Amino acid sequence: METIKMKLIYPKWKKLPGQTTFNLPPHGPVAFAATLPEWVDIDFVDENVEEINFDDPCDIVSLSTMLSTQVKRAWEIAAEYHKRGKTVLAGGISAMLHAEEFVNHVDSLFLGESEGRSEQVLLDWKEGKLKKVYNFLGKQPPIESVGPCRRDLYKRELYNHKGVQMVDLFHASRGCRFSCYPCAVSYLGGRKFRPRPIDKVVEDMAAIDNNRLFIVDNSLAQDKEWEKELFRAIAPLKKKWISHTIEDDPEVLDLAGKAGAWYVYQAVYDTSDYIKERVKRYHDNGIGVEGTILLGLDNQTVDDCKRLVDFLGEIDLDLAEFTIMTPFPHTKAYDDYLRQGRIFDFDWNHYNAGQVVFKPAKMTPDELQDVYDYAWKSFYASETQESKMFRLFCNVALREMNEGTYRPRNRALANKSFGKDVDRSIKTHQNSY
């Protein structure tokens, strides 16, 4: 088969003001790239860390999008390539969520998971039979067909934060048996939990040349026995990893800590003793906690939100991330708010979880925006977000040193103060963390 050259692009988006900015190597594009046939030569560009040269030679363009705030930029990119006579394909999470509009900007839109399917799309294109839409939503391929991502496409030197290498993204399962009100996962990946075979997970994870990972599964707390088997299997790899929620079970938490759990994202939704004890149980197992706090729910007043923010100071969170309730398409929230006439802003650039686009039930949009700003300023008043992140990096670096797996910062980035300070701190204060 004659080789074709594909330009695979991950569009940029505007970062939220006031927050520490760093770029993780994206997961979606390299997961898609792994499903392409060998006769496709891929040139990958993450526009968040490098510019697109629209005049680079290529046969076909593919856009991979994850966030709603990327879609309008993706359309601009498609228009530039159409001026040059190129065929533009698109897929990814936000391409699926905004398919009704997205399809008007590209030559072909792919909906669903691409394992075992991408080659036929390109063969159709070669034969002049490219379809406008390839819709596989609800028709998931066998989970056994999911293989390693094409991480060789990353330009590694571009993914660091002041001298510290960013984590690699990794997934051990797909689908989610939960159907949370503001979440679109059940629409995108189905309500069935689909774990990858444990031996494939271990093989894939072991091959990643990065000791720090972000396991991006929607929740690891889906099947307790699978969770325990997973943690036992990956423990010998001595990776350090971040994930979403872990089962609140003593054995599971013990195994997670021993398997390298670095820190978790844990929803903080009320001021109960359960939440306080939940955070403590993570810490007791050597696992840090980044609280995720959603503001603007229908049962919240301004005072409720402020009480929740103040409560965070009592529970010893390592980090906190505040988001504004956002009605993304194909969620129950979107359907309800649209029916109730409460959405007043349909500019997808504003769907960044940091800007109010709907009318809250118990406060005004301006009050919600103000309480969101208050939350960030209040939590990080005594110590900056970057300083708290620095402490987490030192924690994990010290654990790695004790295990003999620590890698000093990249020599090419030696002038970056954050990386130098991490190295200096773990050497000077090994018993302080």
Image: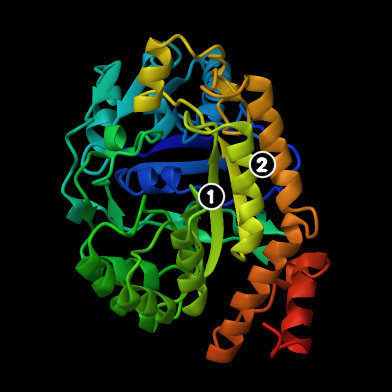
Say which of 21 and 89 sits in front: 21
Residue type at mark 2: give it: Glu
Q: Residue at x 70, y 47 (%)?
A: 21
Residue at mark 2: 50
Q: Earlier in the sequence, mark 1 or mark 2?
A: 2
**Residue 245, image quadrant:** bottom left
Screen quadrant of the N terminus: top left
Q: Given contact means CB atoms under 8 Å apart, are the residues at marks 1 and 2 in contact?
A: no
Answer whether residue 282 is visible to the viewer in this image.
yes
Screen quadrant of the C terminus: bottom right
Answer whether residue 162 is visible to the viewer in this image.
no
Q: CA distance from mark 1 to mark 2?
A: 30 Å
Say which of 18 and 199 sits in front: 18
Residue 416 position within the rendered picture, expressed as x and y whole percent measured from the top left: 80, 64
Left or right, 113 with respect to 431, comes to left
Residue type at mark 1: give it: Thr
Say which of 275 and 224 sits in front: 275
Q: Residue at x 55, y 46 (%)?
A: 293
**Residue 47, image quadrant:** top right
**Which disc is residue 292 wearing?**
1
**Which disc is residue 16 wearing?**
none
Number of callouts in the render? 2
Residue 14 position within the rendered picture, expressed as x and y whole percent measured from the top left: 66, 32
Question: Nearer the viewer's eye, disc 1 or disc 2?
Answer: 1
For residue 321, above or below residue 64: below
Residue 290 position within the rendered picture, expressed as x and y whole percent measured from the top left: 56, 58
User: Crowding near pointer 1: few (<14 within 10 Å), some, many (20+)?
Assistant: some
User: Crowding near pointer 2: few (<14 within 10 Å), some, many (20+)?
Assistant: few
As helix, strand or loop, the secondary structure at mark 1 comes to strand
As helix, strand or loop, the secondary structure at mark 2 comes to loop
Q: Residue at x 60, y 58 (%)?
A: 156
Say which of 65 and 6 sits in front: 65
